[in-house]
Amino acid sequence: MEIVIVGGGIAGLGLALNLHKRGIPSRVFESAPEIRELGVGITLLPHAMRELTELGLQNDLLPLGIENRESLFFNRFGQLIYKEPLGRYAGYRYPELGIHRGRLHVVMYESAVAQLGRDRIVTNRACAGLDQDAAGVTLQFRETSTGAAADDVRADVVVGCDGVNSTVRKRFYPDERMAFAGINTWRGVSRHAPILGGRSYLRVGSIRTGKLVIYPIGDDRDGRQLINWVAEIEKPSAKKNDWNKPGSLGDFLPVYRDWRFDWLDVPEMLGNSELILEYPMVDKDPVARWTFGRVTLAGDAAHPMYPRGANGAAQALIDSRTLADLLRKTPDPLAALAAYEQERLPATAKVVRTNRAHPPDYINIRVEELTGDRPFDNLDKFISQEELRDLSDRYKRVAGFAMSDLS
């Protein structure tokens, strides 16, 4: 059985490594001409690290990032709302890691090349179409760099792991559109002295009045850290940001101009950014099917979700392991794809919907509502720490990384 994976990101490389571990050959076709360290930061939650540990990558990844100790929630006046330990500091078997997305990608790519062989990871190939018959699937490709037609590829099974703008998905949902609710984001990386100990994941403010997510993704030689930040601003009438486009500080800094706390000068940190990219916060409505004969979807191609729970990478990796297990256990590949869809589609659809309505930063939104978006003298007058902990635990249960899920 020959599996072709369209897309060499986290989902695609994770699937290739999982298949190889189970003795199933695959080839990966990635549209980028080369694999480089691009982008900004990513958080690998304990269930993502579980999957990467099973692939033998934990020891490679830990020295490249920052293992988070705690999650801290603040209002936009810099007051602490709620905190909780993270990863191994909370009793999980697996760490929670902040890391540069490009470093994660390169580690996975190099592992795939070493295990599968360089000829099995093909770059500079954009999927241009596919056709299937009773015996298999024929894929058409073009060279990304030139647009020239490349050789067709034949496969027994095709898995679309080509992201939120998936060409494979578009083959079956040609009229589908992104769901945009007026939330735009800007992401960047700054070099800064460690913030609150240098091992904290911070959510400050809410999307209704301006929100920041801040966490370290690496240490610098002079004692500073690489700080990943994400600015999220909701404006119902806002025009959707472009994708992965260089962003302008002036487009969002005014929202945060007064955010000077005794533990962080936010305008200074944002102003020192080495890189700013803009993105829209978009997802897609869950669909009824991912699998069409010998073709299925995984990762963001299957279930694009708001990045408000730091959960996309974990769900992609779980997709990959689940699909590889079923392809190994089930003699009929069509039955394996159907079983994969039955197991993973409902679970991820629930995460997509929860990320819209009650993601982890719902804690910030709820406190803002209860306090009238004003500083408080005693938060317990409005909501207890136990109620806030319950909000946090609910998300963990939906997303699949409650302590009981990873014991």
Image (tube, helix red, strand yellow):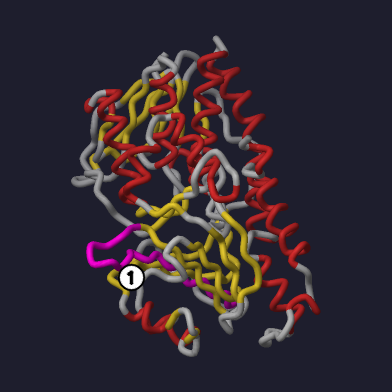
Looking at the image, residue 27 sits to the left or right of residue 117; the answer is right
- Quarter of the image with the C terminus in it: top right
Extreme residue in the top direction: 331
- Classified by dominant secondary structure, the portion drawn in magenta counts as strand
Q: Nearer the viewer, residue 388 or 232?
A: 388
What residue lies at 52% left-to-right and 45% top-to-bottom?
174
Relative image position of residue 397 (x, y in whole percent) = 69, 46
Local crowd size for mark 1, using a 10 Å CA cut-off: few (<14), some (14–19), many (≥20): many
Q: Is residue 123 above or below residue 54?
A: below
Was residue 225 drawn as part of the magenta stretch in this picture?
A: yes
Image quadrant assignment for residue 124 = top left
Q: Is residue 334 above or below residue 104?
A: above
Q: Which residue is mark 1?
A: 190
**Is any atom of residue 175 visible in this view?**
no
What residue lies at 44% left-to-right and 27% top-to-bottom?
158
Q: Nearer the viewer, residue 175 or 161?
A: 161
Relative image position of residue 263 (x, y in whole percent) = 47, 79
**Is any atom of residue 189 visible in this view?**
yes
Image quadrant assignment for residue 71 = bottom right
- Quarter of the image with the N terminus in it: top left
Q: Is residue 265 above or below residue 14?
A: below
What residue lies at 58% left-to-right and 76% top-to-bottom?
205
Extreme residue in the left direction: 146
Extreme residue in the bottom direction: 258
Looking at the image, residue 286 sits to the left or right of residue 65; the answer is right
What residue lies at 46% left-to-right and 13% top-to-bottom?
135
Was residue 277 drawn as part of the magenta stretch in this picture?
A: no
Relative image position of residue 323 (x, y in whole percent) = 53, 26
Identify the amino acid type marked 1. Answer: Ser
Q: Which residues are magenta?
A: 218-235
